Amino acid sequence: MSDVVEKTLTALPSLLSLDSQPGSAKLSSSSKLGNLIRGITELTSKHEEEKLIQRELLLIKEQVSSPNTTMRQMKELMVRAIYCEMLGYGVSFSYIHAIKLAQQGNVLEKRVGYLAVSLFLNEGHELLLLLVNTVLKDLQSTNLIEVCMALTVVSQMFPKDMIPAILPLVEEKLNHPKEIIRRKAVLALYKFYLIAPNQVQHIHNKFRKALCDKDPGVMSASLHIYLQLIQENPEGYKDLAPSFVTILKQVVAGKLPMDFNYHSVPAPWLQIHLLRILSLLGKSDQSTSEIMYEILDESLRRAEMNHNITYAILYECVKCVYTIHPKSDLLEKAAKCIGNFVLSPKINLKYLGLKALTYVVQQDPKLALQHQMTIIECLDHPDLIIKRETLELLFRITNEQNVTVIVEKMLDFLQINKDDHTTIDLVGKVAELAEKYAPDNEWFIETMNTVFSVGGDLLQPDIPNSFLKLLSEGFDSVEEDKKLRLFAVNSYVSLLEGGPSKLPQRFLQVICWVLGEFSHLREDLEPDVVLRMLAKLLDMKSSSSETKCWVLMAMTKLCSGGAALALVQDVSETYSSSLDTMLRQRAQELQILSQDSKLQAKVLPRSASMEPVEVDSSLSFLDGFVSEALAAGAAPYKPPHQRQEELSRSKALNMEPYGLSLPIGMSSCSVTDRQSPTLLSISSGLSGDSADFSHKGSSAALKLDGVKRLWGRDGYLAKKEAAEEAPQVEAASPVRSPSQRGDTDGSVSQTPTPECDQEKQQLASSLFVGLATQSSVCLMGKSEPTSQRFRRKPKASGGSEPMSNPLASPSDGADNVLPQNLLDSSDLDVSSPEQTHGLPQDPDTPNGSCTAEEESADPMAEPSAHEDLDRSRDSCLSSHLPAELSALSHSEITSLCSNQSLDVSACHVQREDSVVLVVFVSNRSDFCLQQMRLQVQSEELEVSCASDCPSEELKSHSVAVCQYLLTVQRPSVHFDLSATVSWQLPAGSPQTAPFSYKLPLTGFIRALRLSTEEYGAMWLAYSHDTKLNLTLMDDDQDPLAATLHVLKRKLQLHVVEIIGVEAIVACCLQQDQPCLMHCRVHAGMLAVWLRSPVPDLPDCLLYHCQRALQEP
Amino acid sequence: MIKFVLMVNQQGQTRLSKYYDPVELSRRAALEAVVVRCCLSRSKHECSFVEYNDFKLVYRQYAALYVVVGITHSENELSIYELIQNFVEVLDKYFSRVVSSIMFNLDSVHIILDEMIQNGHIVETNKSRILAPLTAIDKMADG
């Protein structure tokens, strides 16, 4: 490889020996374009410009379509058209002429034709197809310039489907004697790789050849492909690391021809490109990183030259050093480099230094300490951009101890910032920090108040949602919860008293919800008073009708016991005639519930926002109403897509475009209204889900997740002990706002006045406190719940949530921004599976794997022992499977509970007609366990003992096997089994340990073999149905078949028949409970319709279908 | 990645625009107006990089002409800053009086830019190689 590159560097480009004197064909200011441009420049108003351009466009339009226009004139017209379109005036009439020009013009005209096409058309434009023949012809031209042009346009845009037509020609060009052609061919292939990677899969070895090309230009063109490939799969290209290192070495050593230099720096952009590739390859790979150390060291050393471009390379180098496997002396040099950047009087360098520091502190927070004084200077920099970048840096080093100061700085910035995008971003960060590190309730609520007032209605909706969720779910301590809620109530009451007219709508909604839910916590506060405050909000002109809905909701919660009855009646009367249906609904609810305190207490039990509410998604409570209506002669309900089908059948013309909208609308409808247990809860109102929440932090951060903090060299802080010893000044630290501070001139003042210095020292100690003492784990564990003050209860943390406890609750504003209909929910009784927090499960095994959580309270259980166990358990325990089950497929044997005396593991076995849970209890101790008993139960499953443990005694190091027959009583997405094992050691008291087991619905699903006729008869008989649009599998040939295949393989569904774009599928839940599925490909989606005689079964099955299709 | 390249005069009039991410024609004028306002309002002492929505602007002023490049956050700002200089040096090599020639030779400037940046990536920075195709075309047109 290296000698190929050697050769490369000695070969000089030959095409480029062409004379590059300024071209003579240039236009002067007297041309028509010149006149147009000058005309535009002289104009003063937009209106005049528009008039002039419209006149010009008419002229162009007339001339392009005239048969007498020569190609030379056409070229000139195209440039004018380009100019007009650049100013924002569409020139679509000339698109076709641009293609014609590329087809028929001579060289320069052709180039302008191609140029116009690339500027006018976007990649999907259908006119682009007309260009294919021209490109094909030019690629075969003997004129190199034409070949060049064709390759240039191809590497900018080309219709994806036509790639095969020109691919052989482009491939051929890789062997062209001229380097410029080879280079452009490589770039064209890069474009093909970007738009259709499959099409160029077979020529990956040719990319390698391009990398080894003797011309440096061709080699560097191939790096684009490699950067892309390595980004997607770094493991696949580790063998190339030495080659990239060799290339970089030679570039750095100045072995490229002189004309690759830029201001005497050899090919700087090529160096940057190579450094990016190296950092991808060296990331968490020690052996690959070791190959690079030498050249990185060399690159860092070469940085003496004082030019921007060397700093640009250095920055990339530093990033690389901190990305790959660490080496201490390199880190030290890189850190010094960053120091030079941030200390530089050049503002652009300072910015880059801050950016580098922001990147680096995530791995080594102590580095921030070294530069703390500079950071503080930057925080007060007059340039907002520098300030903003500094805050970004501080955001990354925030901990429990410095949070108050950093948040204060952020809020200060928000006061002067005018850019909406920055405001939204920063407000989100403040909210995140506040929730993670809040030192006390007071501070938290006040900070959130500022977030809500500053963020206004631009705020991302998940911030108020998660805030309310946090308040309603509470934390580990009931006492703390109460204090926090009470504080919020107090704070909001005083805000409302102080004049709420300036508060943003979102904030008002939050206030309404909190007062409605928790104002009873404040004993001296009469509901009447709160009701009056709320009623005032209704009278404010600025209140939106959404806010009014929230107000009415809150009033409904507070109106019990006839509080302020007259006021309530008045309000509900006013709004029950509102034009807004939501408002009217709320007003109705308020009216009815305020008069019936018994019903009110039932519908809105106090402090019950956490209680799950069961929702009858099949709307069975309406059955009576429906049958009455039917009896009275009403037409039976037809679902939208059936209606649409009938409509299209009855019409002679199928108006496809109109038809399109219906199923799409239906799908969104079925997601939000029917609340099927899907993961599709995309509507913003439903986004308060805790899983989302925990990801918020990582999405805002640079993508460094998973980067281990590998270096933790001591000694960085030697000089900065003062900071470590500084008392932990928190909120009390005298931080001054920027306006109070003297103006700095932007340059670093190296010798600040002693007074000012002291102040800054003080600020420094409050900003950087905690960094030095922080253990490495703590910093990286930013998102760990342990470091958070407001730790959610384990219940809310997605994965471990008991599945029978759905979070949906109508009175919980956090889960649903749109208030739900309270009156409806009062009648609900039947439960249904509404889980959106499905546990990940492996759909590949028909059984589905089971996820089990250990709830053992025994702290002695060692994780390491677990791992060992995991490996050997399966093989070991499966030998204990009863003979009649051992031939059947069983799920992975999972450890459920483990302690010093025993291990409990389990798996489920799928029999033809049932599912058997097999529990293995292994005695780990040296004693005989006595009175060993197992108890297994579930809400949705009937658990019957197939064979209980043979005896109550378990000998030392032996295994007892118990079997339980599981029967579904009520379909659910997942079934939870909770169990306890109890035992007694010979010389001890009785002990128990709880454990749980979870298995998916799919374990109980079996294929149902039917004929199409049987299917038809059954379909009409079943009443419970559900519909949804699913994504089709990506398959060019037959997406329907591919999708059905996945469903068949993963869920054991039986495909009855496929007719064109439709298919019918059947399965049953444990032999006797069928579920039928009708699939239809429509508008790129799979519209599925499930029917079953069993309530909830369609919904639950649909959930698994969706999962099966989502997972690779 | 580079999102767009803009050349504007001090009055905020667009002299050249090239987008590497599709942006609707109707949205371009508004975007350009905001971008220009962002850059023109800054003093010489201030940093040449500006945050704008979800991307960054790197700009450089040459007399009455501003070159503004929109980039993603992962891009190296300083290398783009120097890329602008390189671009202008190439234009300088090709045209004798850059500012007015750029105005009247929109097509040539675009052709030069196409040689330097494709699909938002820097594909060539060697000045003579950037100009090679264009000078070859000029020669053929002359001959």
Image: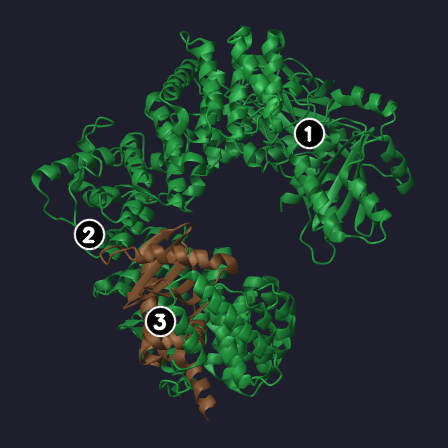
Chain colours: A green, B brown
**Residue A46 spot, x, y in % from top left:** 43, 61
Element carrying mark 2? helix
Q: Residue at x 46, y 14 (%)?
A: A532
Q: Quadrant of residue A7?
A: bottom left
Question: Residue A411 versus residue A507: which sits nearer the camera?
Answer: A507
| Chain assignment, label 2 | A
Q: Chain of mark 3?
A: B
Q: Residue furthest left?
A: A754
Query: Do labels 2 and 3 touch, CB within 8 Å?
Result: no
Residue A821 showing in the rendered view: yes
Which residue was labeled with disc 3? B87
Q: Is residue A682 above or below residue A2?
A: above
Foreground of the two, A484 or A1: A484
Residue type at the position of mark 3: Phe
Q: Is residue A1062 above or below residue A448?
A: below
Between marks 2 and 3, how big is the CA–CA gap? 29 Å
Q: Is residue A17 left or right of residue A882?
A: left
**Residue farthest along the bottom direction in this orientation:** B143
Q: Secondary structure at mark 3?
A: helix
Identify which residue is drawn at 44% across, 14% down. Answer: A478
Element under label 1? strand
Q: Which residue is mark 2?
A: A343
Q: Which mark is residue A908?
A: 1
Say the numbered circle drawn on residue A144.
none
Q: Residues within 10 Å of mark 1 (few under 14, many from 20)?
A: many
Q: Position of residue A755 (x, y in %)?
A: 9, 37
Gap between marks 1 and 3 measured at Cα: 67 Å
